[in-house]
Amino acid sequence: MFKITFIGAGSLTFTRNFLSDLMTYPEFDGSEICLMDIDEKKLGMMDALARKMIAQESLNMRVHSTTDRREALRNADYVIITIQVGGLDAFALDIEIPRKHGVLQCVGDTMGPGGVFRGLRHLSVISEIYKELEEVSPDALVLQYSNPMGIICRAVAASSSIRTVGLCHSVQGTSEQLAQFIGAPYGEIDYWVAGINHMAWFLEFNWNSKDAYPLLRQSYNDPEIYGMEPVRFDLMKHFGYFVTESSGHASEYYPYFRKRQEQIDELVTKFTHPSTDWYGFGRTAGALDYTRNERVADYYQFFEKQLAPDANIPICRSNEYGVRIIHAIETNSLLRINGNVTNNGSIFNLPKEACVEVPCIVDASGIRPCIVGELPVQLAALNQTNLNVQELAVQGFLHRDKSLIYQAVKLDPLAGAACTLEQIDSLVTEMFESQAEWLPQFKS
């Protein structure tokens, strides 16, 4: 039986879902679960939750929790990474410093100054994780969930031999959403999606094997549906295809939506559905404010309720790919996912070294990316604007070259639309100074 290690096990959404997913497969009974986090309080609560779930389901899974990362990684077959270096303090700096300089981010964890510096912080830790894996578990498969996906996966592919796939739920989540928009049962749709993380494109979207894009374009005119995803529908209107990341998030990746405060004020009025509250209906700092005001309190309330002696913990399978991948490998079952992998020719008109999000086939032989061919030229062009930023950020990290980080932010579509080159210099300097404690690789 295998050992699965969770790094950043205090993550409520991911770890809770993964534990439940593991328990839906009878073949996994008897496996070893190792939970690792630097926050002892959160780790203790997650350990108690895991043990209660195992007892409730009368399983023989073994749980071990530790703050010792190297020990957690030792002899691991699978490693799930869900870390957030610097926590809310660093997240706030990612948003507030750029805002002071005119870059108005809604989420700020993938692109923009926030995404670049989150990537640098995470790589300062993740690069050490990979070094330890090379020593204690060189055959492990890493299921990498932390953002910014593209920057992290590109960097580890360039610097380590450890097998890795980057995973996100935006493809499966969007496919479920699109089925609802056109009134189709989810089991009757199929799709073919490719691009880069948070900017992958539904190249095909079918209902009972017939093109469903005409129905999707009609839904653009439904005010309730449009109010859920105004940015994504506008992108589809202008570029022809639906993109995978939610509208508040997506509004940061292009130069069109949030250059000035008055433009954001207008954008906010387009978010009319309650489901968009998690990013503040597109407002600057929307995701940060929601996390501070809602998710922190919800975190501890969840554990209080679930750990009550008479509480029954629901066990059901989520739409996350991680445990499904483990099952496909361990049982030699065929599975198709969308994974973040090195391109190597999957998408002909994107760089071969880039991290791309493409369909992959999984079985006992591992994870094999599919050949997509050429993206429509306009979609490849949009992807490339983000890949430029990612590549400079990665090279800046790998070579410890601050000048490349300045250039990465200067090439960012939103930062470039909102700021002069000199303003970006000031912004990046302040980001380096404020986040120095999490960026030891740049202390020289």
Image (tube, rainbow, N blue to C red):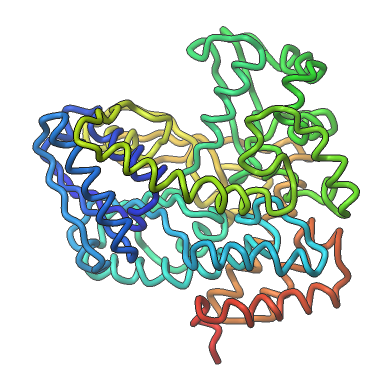
Residue 265: percent from left, percent from top:
85, 44
Quadrant of the rendering where the N terminus is positioned: top left
Residue placed at 16% from the left, 31% from the top?
A: 56
Residue in the foreground of this view, choosing between 403 and 419: 419
Q: Residue at x 19, y 35 (%)?
A: 309
Please state the horizontal and vertical placement of residue 213, each as a whole percent of the image. 71, 17
- Residue at point 34% right, 51% down? 80
* Above or below 211: residue 388: below
Drawn side of residue 43 relative to residue 161, left or right: left
Q: Say how many tags the image has.
A: 0
Is 33 placed above or below 216 here? below
Quadrant of residue 70 within the rendered picture: bottom left
Relative to residue 442, is residue 372 depicted above or below? above
Residue 357 x/y as whole percent: 55, 43
User: In which quadrant of the rendered view does residue 16 lie?
Assistant: top left
Question: Which residue in the rendered view is the most extreme toward the bottom?
Answer: 444
Residue 219 falls in which quadrant of the image? top right
Left or right of 367 in this view: 230: right
Q: Which of these two is toward me, 318 or 139?
A: 318
**Residue in view at x 75 percent, y 54 percent:** 385
| Quarter of the C terminus within the rendering | bottom right
Residue 398 rendering spot, x and y as whole percentages: 53, 75
**85 or 303, nearer to the observer:** 303
406 horizontally vs 135: left or right: right
Please tell me whether residue 234 is drawn above or below residue 390 in the rendered image.
above
